[in-house]
Amino acid sequence: MKFILMVLMLSSYAALADDDSSSSKKPGVIPVNNPQYAEECGACHFAYQPGLMPSRSWKKVMANLVDHFDENAELEADEQKALTAYLTKNAAESSKHKRSVKIMRSLTKNAAPLRIIEIPYMVEKHDELTPKMVAGNPEVKSLSYCDKCHTNAITGSYSEDDIVVPGYGNWEEYEKSSGFLGRIKKGAKELYKDVTGN
Amino acid sequence: MKFCALIASTTLSSFVVSASLYATPVDDLLVEYRSTGVETFSAEAGKALWSQEFTNAKTGKIRQCTTCHTADLRKEGKHARTGKVIKPLAPSVNPKRLTDVKKIRKWFKRNCKWTLGRECNAQEKGDMLLFIQNFNGEQQ
């Protein structure tokens, strides 16, 4: 019984570690590589990588720039066309990068959320955060601002050891030292050490 | 001697030509705005518009140019919604400003709609261009 429990814990630890390890050379999503997109969209907000949403979502966003989440983000027709092409061509379904694949896997067939943070995979990935850490945190304010906590977001990396929540420090450290999941992870890690000597 | 004079006159004429060829984007836009019937532009009027308060129909909140850009154009501003830093607008501290006609058009369109709830007219745009171009803090 003890052995089974240990195996269970080890495997779940391995799964967790694998999910967010930064050791993989490939970033989670393809970084933005279109200067026009970086300039036009990045002028007001973090230039979200195209691989963070399916093309059907990008099409919807780009079709209504006049009312872009209550802001006016109108573009000239030619620019709008060029940027829509860039976004849809490099959207999540066209990428083999880890996060893009998981984003697509979490969406039902025709789901086209307007916000990245509404994608089930994203919701799940952020479910440990408290309102105090985000909305109530003047340095974060909203989950829309990826790069407030994902310190390497601009490179397309969203790995867990790059996360620093302002006021809470490095996320891995924080998680290790608090919370139920943190305690499980910590326990599993120690157990893993005991068994393997690593 | 004749040769020197020739060089001098060539240099001079090319200077004159280049000066007229390289009218600034602001000059070009003012010409365009004048063509719609506006006669004079005023930095003073631009300054007044800059801090004028507009009540947004949807949110009921006050919106001004200064909401994001601050009253001192030599300072950095902050996007009201996203908090993203906006580089200073005054060409005296940020020489890149007012150098790109396309950008000027784009931001007038977007930001007038956000602030005033409509596009700005030629008079307003010309006034604001002069205000921004001449901003040195003394008007404050």
Image: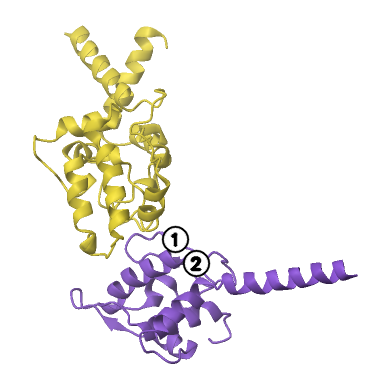
Label 1, label 2: how far apart the Cα atoms are: 7 Å
Q: Callout 1: few (<14), some (14-19), or many (20+) C-alpha neighbours within 10 Å?
A: some
Instruction: Where is residue A128? Give x, y as percent.
Output: 24, 40
Chain A colour as displayed: yellow
Q: Nearer the viewer, residue A78 or B138?
A: A78
Check the residue under mark 1 and report the chain it is in. B
Mark 1: which secondary structure?
strand
Say which quarter of the image contains residue A21: top left
Q: Is residue B52 above or below residue B28?
A: below
Instruction: Judge whether A166 appears above or below A180 on screen.
Output: below
Picture colour for chain B? purple
Q: Chain of mark 2?
A: B
Percent position of residue A140, x then y: 35, 53
* Image x and y of residue B27, in percent: 51, 77
Numbered tag placed on residue A144 in the rendering: none
Q: Badge 2, how many Cα within 10 Å: few under 14, some, many 20+?
A: some
Residue hosting label 1: B85
> Judging from the image, what secondary structure is the residue with disc 2 in?
loop
Q: Nearer the viewer, residue B46 or B7?
A: B7
Q: Quadrant of residue A24?
A: top left
CB-based contact (under 8 Å), mark 1 and mark 2: yes
